[in-house]
Image (spheres, coloured by chain):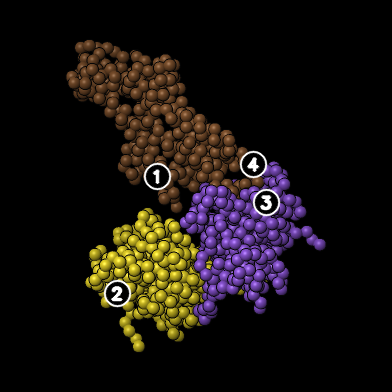
Amino acid sequence: MTPNLLKLENVVKHFPAKGSLFYSEAGTLEKGSLLRAVDGVTFTLDPHRTLGVVGESGCGKTTLARTILHVIKPSSGKIYFEDVNLTTLSYGQLAKIRPNMQMVFQDPYSSLDPRKRARDIIAEPLRVMIKDKHRINERVKEVIKQVGLEEEQSGRFPNEFSGGQRQRIGIARAIASRPKLVVLDEPTSAVDASTQAQILNLLRQIQEEYQMSYLLISHNIDVVRYMSNRIAVMYLGKFVEIGPTEDVINSPKHPYSAALVSSVPKPDPRARAEMVEIKGETPSPINPPSGCRYHPRCPFATDLCTQEEPKLQEVEHNSVACHYPIKH
Amino acid sequence: MISDPILGIDDLTIAFETSEGKYSALNGVNLRINPSEIVGLVGESGCGKSSLALAVIGLLPVPPARVLRGNIIFKGNNLLKLTETGIEKVRGTGISMVFQEPLTSLNPLFTVGEQITEAITVRLQRQKSAHTKSTVEAEGVAWLKRVGLPDARGAFHRYPHELSGGMRQRVMIAMALSASPTLMIADEPTSALDVTTQAQILKLIRKLVEEVKASVLFISHDLAVVAQIADRVAVMYTGMIVEEGPVVEVFEKPLHPYTQALLSSYPGRERSSEPLKVIPGQVPNLTRIPQGCPFHPRCAFAEDKCKTTRPLLKEVRGHNVACVLY
Amino acid sequence: MTFAQDHKDLILTLRILRKDPLAAAGSIIAAVFLAVALAVTLFGNGVAPYDPVAINLSLASQPPSLQHLFGTDNLGRDILSRAIVATPVDAEIAFAIVGISSLFGLVSGSLSAFLGGYVDEVFMRITDLFLAFPSLVLAIAVAVALGPGVTNVILANLIVWWPIYARLSRAGCLSLKQTQYVEAARIAGLSKFSILLEHILPNNISPILVYGTLDVGNAILYASVLSYLGLGAQPPQSEWGRMVFDGQIYLTSAWWISIIPGLIILGVALGFNLLGDALRDVFDPRYRK
C-alpha cells in the first residue's frame, strides 16, 4: 500500500475574533469568540494526483492551504507529509522539508518582491538545498524556459512583466525545487480568460513531467473540474462532500454541493437550468449554526439537522456529511 | 413588432492623450439596444467595455478623453451634445447604473435608506408627483424587500459597510431600478460575488427587469454569465464590436474567429488529457492597436487583406460580424 | 540589462523633478546648499567674497547693496560671506542627525517588528518614552548639560530624533511581514534573518528616505534654534541661527542683519521639504507602471 503523500487528521485552525470584518453581522461578536476558519478537516492526497477544494468566501480554504504549508500553525490536529508529522517539527527541521511543498499564489502583483529580480525570486526555494551558486543558476535557467519565459528576461524586475508572465514566474518559483506537492491558491482568478487557459495548460504539463501532486484551491468550479481527480466541497470550515470529480459534479450528494454546482453559469444559453435552492447568505464563521452548519440555508432541513452535526459517511464513491444525502 | 431602439451607438470613437501616446478606448462602436431587452457586452479586460458604459452615462472625463467621431442616441437625443445639466436629467430616470464594487459606489456616510430615498425622490420630482417623506420611505422599504433583503426595514437603517457584498449589490439594484429607468447599465455587477450569490442576483435581475420593463446593458468578462442572462450579446475587442446577435446564435454558431477562440478556451470540460485551446499572443495595448483588423496578429485565419482592411459590422446569417472572411 | 532598467527609480525621480516646478525648486535649493557646503569645506573661507571674520567698523550696518549683497552687520562684516561660511556647519549637523538616527531607527524598528512579542512591546514603550518629551526642550536640556559645541548639538538631537524613524520603520516592517512575497519566502524555507535582510529592509527604505529628506529641513531648523540660544557653533565660526540672535537688537535699525539669515534658514528648510515631497511622489504606486 503506497503511503499517502499528504494526510490530514482533524485539522483545526481557530483565530481569536477581535472585531473582524469578516462578515459584518451586528451583535455576534462577544469577548473571547473564535473565528473557526478550519474546523476539523480530514483527507488524504496521493502522489501524482490533484485534489480540488471548492468553496465560497469564508469557507476557510485559504486558511487550510496556509495551515498545510505551515505558514500558520494549526490549533489542533495532525498533518502528515510523507508520514512525517509536520506539527512536531521545529522551524529548522521544517525548513528542510519545505523544498518539497510549495505554493503558487493568487495575485501576481503582490506575490513577487518588487525589489528582487525574477531570477533571484525563482532561486529562493533552491537556496535551502543547494549551496553551489552555479547549480542554482543552471536550475533557474532551466525552469524559466519551462514556464515559457525567455532567459534574457530573467534579470528583470516584476513590474516589467505582464500579469500572465508574473504568474509564470510564480510557477517557476514553486517548481524550482522539484516539490512533490504544490498548493495552487486560486492560480488563475486574477488573470483573464485567454491567460487562464495558458496557465492551466502549463500547470497540467508540468504536473505530467514532474509527477507532482496538486492541491487546487478555487472558487471556480470549471477550473477545478478541468484540473482535478477528486473534489472536496468546503463550507464554514469543514468538508461537506469529497469524491471523484465527475461524481461530485454530476451527482452531488450534499445539498450545498448541489446548489454550488448548479449555480455555476455555463457558456450555453440553452442551459439556463434552475439552480438548486439556497436561501440567504453564508453566515459568519465566528458563530456557525448549531447541528449541521448548512441547515439554515437548506431546503430539506429537518429538526435533526438543527441538533446533530452529520459526520462524513460513504455514499456511493463519495464521502458526504449530511443526514439526508441526495440519491441519484 | 419592430420598435425604435432606445439606445443607438453609431461609430463611437473616443481617445485619450497619455504620456505613452494616443489611447484609443473606443474605435467605431456600433450597438443598438431595444426596449425591454437585455444586451450582454462581453470582452476581456482592456477591451474598452467600461469606457463604453461611462461614455453612455456621461461619466467619461472629457478632457482628457476626446470624442473623435460618432453619436450616442438615447430616445431620440444625442447624449454627446448635452451639457452637464442635460446629462444629469437623463441619469436616474433615463439611464441608471450598477457598478461592480458596491462598497465604493455606495456612500459610506449615509444609510441605505437615505440613499434609496434620494433616488426615489429624484424620480418623483421629475415626474412632478406629490410625495411625502413617509410615502417615499415606504416605497424604499418595499424596494429593499423586492430585491430580496431578508430584513428590509432593518437594512433600511443600516450603513453600507454593515451589509455583506451580496446585500449591497441588491441595494444598488434597488436604487437603480427604483428610479424607473429606461435603460440600466450593469458593469460587472456580479464579478465580486460568490457563485451562489451571483446566481441569485442574476435571477433577481432577470425577474425585476421584466417587471419594470427596463432594458439592460449587462457588461461582463465572463462568457458564461452573459449566456445565462442576455437576450442578445455583443463581443468586444480593442474598442470595437466584432460580433453581435441573438445569444443562442452567437454562442452556438460563432462567426468571428475571436468569439470562436474565446468559447473554445473555456475550461468547461472534464479532466481530459486535451490541453485547452489557447489564443496565441496577448490582448494588444490600446495605444498600439494593429492596423487593419485588430485581431489579425492572433487570428488563425488571417489573410493579407486582414492587415490592411478594417472590417465593418455586416449582417451574416442572422447576426452581425466584423470580419474580412464574410 | 540597460542602465535605465537598473536605475528605474533614479530615472523616475529625474523625470518628476523636471516636470514639477516645486520639485525642481526644491532640488535646486538642496543642490546649492550642498555645493556651497562642500566648497567651503574643501577650499576654506576663500570661497566667500569677503573675509567673514574681518571687522571693519567703518562699514558697519550697511544695507544690502551691489558691493554687499546681503549688507554688513554691526561689526562691518559682510553678511553674505558669513552666511556662506556658515553653510557647512548646518550641513554637518543636519546630515549627521538625520543620517545616524535614520540608520539606527531603520535597523532597530525593523528588528523589533520582526522579532515581535515581548521584545517589540518593550521597544515600543521605550520609543513612547522618548516621544513623550517635547523634542526641542529635551534637545536644549541635553545640549545645556553637555555644553556648547557642534558635536554636542548633534548628540542632543540624536536622542530626540531616532524614535520617529524607529516607529516608521517598525510600521513598514509590520505591513511588509503580511505581504505574499514574504509568505512565499517563508514557504521557500528562507531563514528569518534572510527574509529580514533581503525582503523587508530593502522595501522599508523608501519611506525612511522620503521622511529623512523632509527631515533634513527640520534638522536645520533645530540646529539653528540651538545656535540661536548660544549652544552649538561658537564664535568666531558663524552660524545662521547665531547670526539671527546677534542681529536682533538691530531689528528696527538694520533689519537685514537678523532677517536675512532667518530667510536663508527658512529657504533651505523649505527646499528640503519640497524635495522630500517629490521623492514621496516617486515612491507613490500611482506613478509606477
As helix, strand or loop, the secondary structure at mark 4 comes to loop
The alpha-carbon separation of the residues under discs 3 and 2 comes to 64 Å
Q: Is residue C104 left or right of residue A137?
A: left
Disc 1 and disc 4: Cα gap in Å? 33 Å
Give the percent coordinates (x, y) of residue A2: 79, 61
Q: Are marks 2 and 1 in contact (CB under 8 Å)?
A: no
Chain painted yellow: B
What residue did someone put label 4 on?
C191
Q: Are marks 2 and 4 on the same chain?
A: no
Viewer-proximal residue among B107 and B232: B107
Q: Both on one chain, marks 3 and 4?
A: no
Identify the secondary structure beneath mark 1. Answer: helix
Residue neighbourhood size for the residue with mark 1, other residues' Cα within 10 Å, grouped as few (<14), some (14–19), many (≥20): some
Q: CA distance from mark 2 to mark 4?
A: 63 Å
Q: In this orientation, does residue B25 appear?
A: no
| Upstream in sequence: badge 1 or badge 4 | 4
Q: Nearer the viewer, residue B87 or A291?
A: A291
Q: Alpha-carbon neighbours of circle 4 within 10 Å: few (<14), some, or many (≥20)?
A: some
* Disc 1: which residue: C281
Q: Is residue B218 above or below residue C83?
A: below
Tell me which amino acid carries mark 2: Ile
> Chain for mark 1?
C
